[in-house]
């Protein structure tokens, strides 16, 4: 097996215990985590309560060509599913629609949802907020009877897992298909209750941490427990170093190369690397030549950012600005 060049770096998520990540962060990767089968699909656990996160889980789903996920619904959690590579269809608002890299399907509870891959198969990054613990019973690492994850066993399971082979370049792109279920054609109430199809290149344009970004999933558009932001920047730009006091975050490098600041130092990042920033852990990102794209899953949504914008109306309510294209 060819090991990735990050293998053995002590700050990497597979080499750090849950308590270390919870208090000081780590660098992970969409290729790095325990693999199990969930709803019939091969699922790699990137972030979860077994490695220092409390309010969100992040999984990478790898679909075989033509494979369909078992339809399912959650009573409490929201799920955001981002098509990363390949493509297929998503069951959104009761109908199957095209689902291509860059599209993000949002499913609130208790909406039944599913995905199915086309001829080339499909890779999807899925955030579930709050985490659905029952999923993890199948790994043998969660004990429902006493309500605990065996984090020491999870550490060794992760430490011995085989890295994935997802590689760049990114296929993320802007799409306007299925206009009847696109978030920009629905009200926040409709999205909050029935779901929608977003695209990561379109949202509310914001600049509160010194990097141009769009808020894609956030309360202004309906989601209550799941957030996603997408950002780009000129080479040399560095975001403000910051922490979210009440929001877990996984910031993924979707394109290009970059550096991430965390744990008192800078880390060289390659495509599909992930900054692990649980609640309160400081982090920042930089942009290097080559057109970097950063995008972060955060849960619950980052009120600390929204409260700094003109969209904030106080006590957790927001104006809903139009969804605009991110300039890249
Ligand atoms: Fe952040």
Image (tube, rainbow, N blue to C red):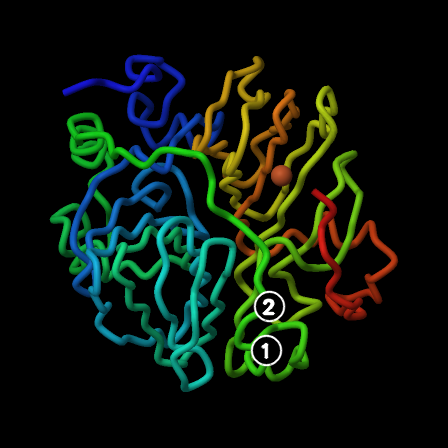
Which corner quadrant of the image does residue 27 belong to?
top left
> Which residue appears at 30% of the width and 42% of the height?
50
SS under mark 1: helix
**Disc 1 + disc 2, Cβ < 8 Å:** yes
The CA distance from mark 1 to mark 2 is 6 Å
> Which residue appears at 53% of the width and 70% of the height?
197
Looking at the image, residue 320 lies above or below residue 229: below
Looking at the image, residue 223 lies above or below residue 192: above
Which corner quadrant of the image does residue 44 belong to?
top left
| Residue matched to label 2 | 176
Looking at the image, residue 58 lies above or below residue 275: below
> Which residue appears at 46% of the width and 61% of the height?
80
| Residue matched to label 1 | 179
The answer to which of 25 and 196 lies nearer the viewer is 196
> Which residue appears at 33% of the width and 51% of the height?
123
Residue 207 in the image, given as x and y percentages of width and height: 80, 43
Q: Residues within 10 Å of mark 1 (few under 14, many from 20)?
A: few
């Amino acid at each position: 097996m060819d090991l990735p060049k990050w293998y053995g770096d002590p700050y990497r998520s597979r080499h750090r215990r849950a308590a270390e990540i919870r208090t000081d962060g780590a660098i992970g990767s969409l290729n790095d985590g325990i693999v199990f089968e969930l709803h019939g699909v091969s699922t790699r656990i990137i972030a979860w309560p077994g490695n220092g996160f409390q309010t969100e889980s992040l999984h990478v789903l790898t679909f075989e060509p033509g494979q369909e996920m078992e339809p399912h619904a959650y009573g409490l959690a929201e799920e955001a599913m981002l098509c990363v590579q390949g493509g297929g269809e998503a069951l959104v608002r009761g109908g199957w629609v095209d689902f291509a890299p860059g599209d993000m399907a949002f499913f609130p509870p208790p909406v039944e949802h599913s995905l199915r891959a086309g001829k080339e198969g499909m890779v999807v990054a899925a955030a579930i907020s709050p985490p659905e613990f029952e999923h993890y019973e199948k790994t043998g690492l969660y004990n429902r009877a006493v309500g605990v994850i065996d984090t020491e066993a999870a550490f060794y399971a992760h430490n011995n897992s085989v890295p994935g082979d997802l590689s760049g370049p990114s296929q993320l792109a802007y799409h306007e298909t299925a206009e009847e279920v696109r978030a920009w054609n629905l009200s926040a109430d409709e999205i909050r209750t029935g779901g929608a199809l977003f695209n990561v290149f379109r949202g509310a344009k914001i600049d509160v941490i010194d990097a141009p970004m769009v808020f894609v999933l956030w309360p202004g558009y309906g989601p209550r427990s799941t957030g996603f932001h997408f950002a780009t920047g000129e080479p040399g730009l560095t975001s403000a170093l910051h922490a979210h006091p009440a929001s877990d975050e996984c910031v993924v490098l979707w394109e290009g190369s970059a550096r991430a600041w965390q744990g008192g130092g800078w880390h060289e990042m390659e495509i599909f690397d992930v900054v692990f920033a649980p609640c309160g852990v400081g982090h920042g990102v930089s942009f290097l030549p080559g057109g970097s794209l950063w995008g972060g899953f955060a849960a619950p949504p980052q009120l600390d950012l929204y409260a700094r914008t003109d969209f904030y109306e106080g006590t957790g309510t927001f104006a809903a600005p139009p969804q605009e294209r991110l300039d890249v």
